[in-house]
Image (cartoon, rainbow, N blue to C red):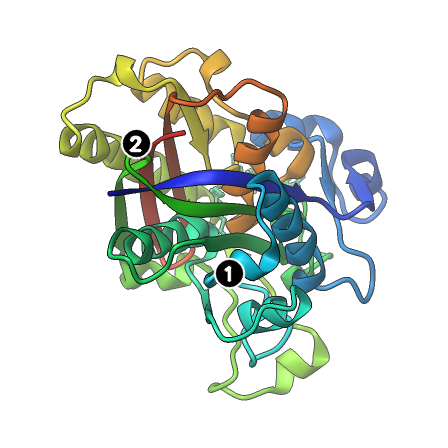
Amino acid sequence: MYSRIVGTGGYLPENVMTNADLEKIVETSDDWITERTGIKQRHIAVEGETTCDIAEKAARQAIEAADLKPQDIDLIIVATTTPDRIFPSTACLLQARLDIHGCAAFDVQAVCTGFVYALSIAEKFIRTGSATRALVVGAETTSRILDWTDRSTCVLFGDGAGAVVLAPSEEAGILSTHLHADGQYSDLLTVPEGVSQGFDKMKAGEAYIQMQGNEVFKMAVNTLGRIVDETLTANNLEKSDIDWLIPHQANIRIIKATARKLNMSMDQVVVTVDHHGNTSAASIPLALDVAVRDGRIKRGETLLLEAFGGGFTWGSALLKY
Ligand code: ACO
């Protein structure tokens, strides 16, 4: 028994912020952002628009694409680093919005690798018979944890949500998932405030992403190269067996390095970073949804999903769509 993706969905807040808009806020330029990151624009939630609001839109789309009703869902996992509340979890809030009652619902926090973690957990629930229709969402309002005076981080991120529905299948679906973390690098990419450390800055809205960009960049390229090898070896596959690479969308240069490692043409790589920026846990399901809806990804094709993010966390999923 496999678990298979039977529906995808995505949602981006309507409000678009271009590089030209950022030029008015911080000392930066469209040329710098484009050359270093590949980003041209990102979507930013308006005031009052929350992670649960955008998660709901992506979730409803994925459920509809799966030809199901919300009440068919019996497991909800939301990957997010920007939950609406400390508790209840965003998954519980989403469950109520969808008028689903009683099934397990919880959040997973692995920053940019969150969706791969959530997918891996849901896959195991389905394969072991503990759930039959799992809703897996990656949703972020990362703009809320950005210091809009720090040009080294505020130009990189955006808001959005992506979702998939997983169901059991006798045909091949998710073939393997690979999850890793190494907390010793926690200070290279962090929001160094939190509940247990005291509320002062959280209250003032001053809990912001801090990143040693250059260090993170080097680690990301090396680590993603290794996880590609690990995933191929575990499945006894060659690089040429992969039809599509769906990478976490942090930086076009990191994405190109992984594609080179796989000897893949960029035509086989789904790129959304130019339009979405880095939407953290939402970036992979959003990219997947874009390429499914525009007809690039077809049933039966082999997809490699991979991510690297704060923690550090990193992971991959190999699947037949
Ligand atoms: N506009 C103009 N100049 C800038 C900007 C900006 N927005 N930001 C930084 N600079 C300047 C710096 O001040 C520096 O100037 P200096 O040389 O005078 O000191 C110069 O540009 C170069 O800065 P670097 O940080 O060395 O630039 P780099 O080439 O490393 O690019 C970047 C920075 C884009 C952040 C890159 O390092 C990166 O993408 N890192 C990885 C990000 C990532 O993958 N994160 C993981 C996932 S995110 C998550 O998990 C939440």
Question: Residue tagged by mark 1?
Answer: 78
The quarter of the displayed image where residue 98 is located: bottom right
Side of 264 relative to 208 (left or right): left
Q: Which mark is residue 302?
A: none
Q: Secondary structure at mark 1?
A: strand
Task: Judge: label 2 CB < 8 Å from ligand 1.
Answer: no
Side of 108 relative to 8 (left or right): left
Residue drawn at point x = 40 percent, y = 63 percent:
187
Q: CA distance from mark 2 to mark 1?
A: 26 Å
- In the displayed structure, would residue 4 be above or below residue 56? above
The quarter of the displayed image where residue 89 is located: bottom right
Amino acid type of the residue tagged 1 in the rendering: Val
Q: Position of residue 37 (x, y in %)?
A: 58, 32
Q: Position of residue 136 (x, y in %)?
A: 48, 53
Amino acid type of the residue tagged 2 in the rendering: Glu
Question: Residue tagged by mark 2?
Answer: 171
Task: Choose between 267 and 32: the one closer to the eye.
Answer: 267
Point out the image quarter for the N terminus.
top left
Give the mark, 2 or 1, whose residue is nearer the N terminus.
1
Q: Quadrant of ligand 1?
A: top right
Does residue 156 show up?
Answer: no
Task: Choose between 91 and 74: the one closer to the eye.
Answer: 74
Task: Choose between 15 and 200: the one closer to the eye.
Answer: 15
Side of 288 relative to 171 (left or right): right
Residue drawn at point x = 27 percent, y = 44 percent:
177
Crowd band around label 1 with a 10 angstrom C-alpha radius: few (<14), some (14–19), many (20+): many
Q: Secondary structure at mark 2?
A: loop
